[in-house]
Amino acid sequence: MPMIDGAIILASFGSADDAIRAKIFDRLAAEIAQAFSTFEVRQAFTSNFMIRKLARRGIFIRTPTEEVARLRAEGFKRIIVLPTHLTAGEEFDNKIKVCEAPDVGIIPPLMSEPLDNKILATILDCFKPTPDEDLILVGHGSPHRHNPIYERLQRLTGDRIHIGVIEETDTPNFDDVVKRLRTFNARNVLLAPLLFNGGVHVDKDIADDWFDKLSSLGYNIRVIRDGLGSFERFRALYIKNLKEIIGIEGCNLGGWLRHTNK
């Protein structure tokens, strides 16, 4: 048996959909375990609603704080929390960042400052519009605190790529996206989720609500329902991020914490 260097907690918002968990969360956890064979890999969800819903079906998943406590009780001295949350918003701050401690390091979300152009390039490689389509990427947004990362992402894109958020009180909202579509004389639209696992947000908010409103304005729309975590090339970004921060050869947690907390 190889020596265990520490533990990695894959922390996600969560999903009650068995197919999504198998296709996205379980697959990424397996890929992490393969890339970091000397680490114990666990999963945790930040959504209490999802945790309770799964528990009623006999499927038990802990929160990040609960999983950290369990790993400590098992004797782990080095714990890394890897969020699949794309941005450092309220969910990340209130459910994941709070786990940070001398023995617990937090990997920043992929869409953190400074924004990496390679992340946008990978997203565009997952969602490929045809030459006559404009691409709309719809993220979650926040009802309580504006997250400027979406507007900064917009500044990195071309004229025919438009960033929006589901939360109506946040920006760039639906009306902001329509203004851009009109500015660039768009007619055909590819609507895709700027979300890790999609699920109900894609079905209800994007493929239903945004689709209907855009259709009523005369746009021809094609929808992609798969979240970004469905794509191997996007999941590979998490592996790459881990390797760059903790190193391929084991984990010097103290040095890594000094690096990420600058």
Image (cartoon, helix red, strand yellow):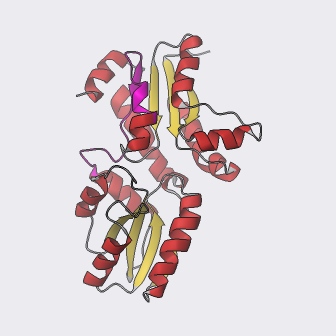
**Residue 206 x %, y %:** 51, 68
Q: Is residue 211 above or below residue 104?
A: below
Residue at 39% of width from left, 70% of height from top? 136
Helix, strand or loop for the magenta stretch, by majority: loop
The image quarter in which residue 52 lies: top right
Q: Is residue 73 above or below residue 199?
A: above
> Is residue 184 visible in this depiction of the protein?
no
> Is residue 212 visible in this depiction of the protein?
yes
Quadrant containing the C terminus in the rendered view: top left
Give 7 or 261, whichever is nearer the viewer: 261
The image quarter in which residue 110 lies: top left
Q: Horizontally, is 4 left or right of 217 in the view? A: right
Residue at 46% of width from left, 30% of height from top? 81
Quadrant containing the N terminus in the rendered view: top right
Total numbered circles: 0
Question: Which span is picked out in magenta?
Answer: 95-116
> Per the image, is 104 magenta?
yes
Q: Horizontally, is 62 left or right of 149 in the view? A: right
Furthest residue toward top: 75
The image quarter in which residue 253 lies: top left
**Residue 237 x %, y %:** 41, 45
**Residue 56 x %, y %:** 75, 40
Give 54 or 37, whichever is nearer the viewer: 54
Furthest residue toward bottom: 218
**Residue 205 x %, y %:** 52, 66
Residue at 34% of width from left, 74% of height from top? 175
Give 150 or 228, whichever is nearer the viewer: 150
Q: Is residue 20 above or below residue 249?
A: below
> Per the image, is 183 magenta?
no
Q: Is residue 148 above or below residue 224?
A: above
